[in-house]
Image (cartoon, grey):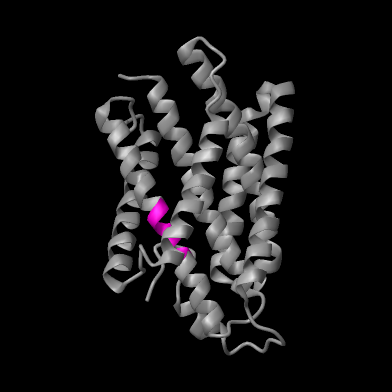
Amino acid sequence: MRSGNPVLSHDVFRIEQSAVASTTMTIAGTVTKTAILLAITVAGAAVSWVHVERVPELMMTYIWGGMISGLVFGVATSFKPTWSPVTSLIYALCEGLFLGALSLFADQYAQAMTGSQTRIVPQAIILTFGTLAAMLTAYRSGLVRATEKFKMGVVAATGGIALVYVATWILAMFGVAIPYIHQGGMIGIGFSVFVLVIAALNLVLDFDFIETGVQQGAPKYMEWYGAFGLLVTLVWLYIEFLRLLMKLQRRD
């Protein structure tokens, strides 16, 4: 079984069960760790938002610095779950610094496009946590089940999206842009909606991963790893909501 989230894999439990642990993973513990990581992310975002408002020249420093640092610690956490009690905290801080500057940029972009005081960040936040609540409810009620076919479909779609984004970054280095999907027309908006659906479905796989870890008696530190994986998906979901809302401000 596999999670659609690239940092979460059920294989991890089989590997990590060999480690000696005095206590085991619990749902309550994972929820607590998730709340801690979210609090750190929000605090980091607030710091970078305020700092960039005062010194606009630092916007790209925060965006690129936070994104690259977050990627480094995210990869480190993925390959070494035993480090997650420390690396997941650093990852959350880096993502917060990145998201704060990115959010301010998105708000300023929306205001420039509409000529008003439009604020899309609060909308993106509400949509992100609303989606989290909806998918958790659907999962707990059994309305959505993480079957093998479901997992395979989400994993395949997530991989396809990842390839599109990697191709976009590589082509951008050579001054080439993929047409339509990153613009504000119907195709671009439709692509963003599709990505948001897949990101939301990844939440179901994250819930299943955490529940499986609890059932299999995974070591206590895996609570941090499960919380880290859930944060990765929430960050992705939030960025995609920002992207969609920005596209809606400018219809090509």
User: Is 200 placed left or right of 91 in the picture?
Assistant: left
User: Is 221 placed left or right of 109 in the picture?
Assistant: right
Image quarter where the N terminus lies is bottom left
| Residue 215 visible, this angle | yes
The image shows residue 70, relative to residue 86, as above or below, that is above
Observer-nearest of 10 and 55: 10
The single residue placed furthest to the top in the displayed view is 115
Q: Residue at x 30, y 66 (%)?
A: 150
Q: Position of residue 24 (x, y in %)?
A: 65, 82
Question: Which corner quadrant of the image does residue 78 belong to?
Answer: bottom right
Q: Main secondary structure of the magenta part?
A: helix
Q: Position of residue 237 (x, y in %)?
A: 47, 46
Q: Position of residue 22 (x, y in %)?
A: 72, 87
Q: Position of residue 159 (x, y in %)?
A: 33, 57
Q: How many marks?
A: 0
The single residue placed furthest to the front in the displayed view is 141
Image quarter where the C terminus lies is top left
- Residue interval drawn in magenta: 200-206
User: Is 206 placed left or right of 70 in the picture?
Assistant: left
Q: Residue at x 48, y 66 (%)?
A: 207
| Residue 178 visible, this angle | no
Observer-nearest of 174 and 115: 115
Question: Which corner quadrant of the image does residue 165 belong to?
Answer: top left
204 part of magenta stretch? yes
Q: Residue at x 53, y 78 (%)?
A: 213
26 part of magenta stretch? no
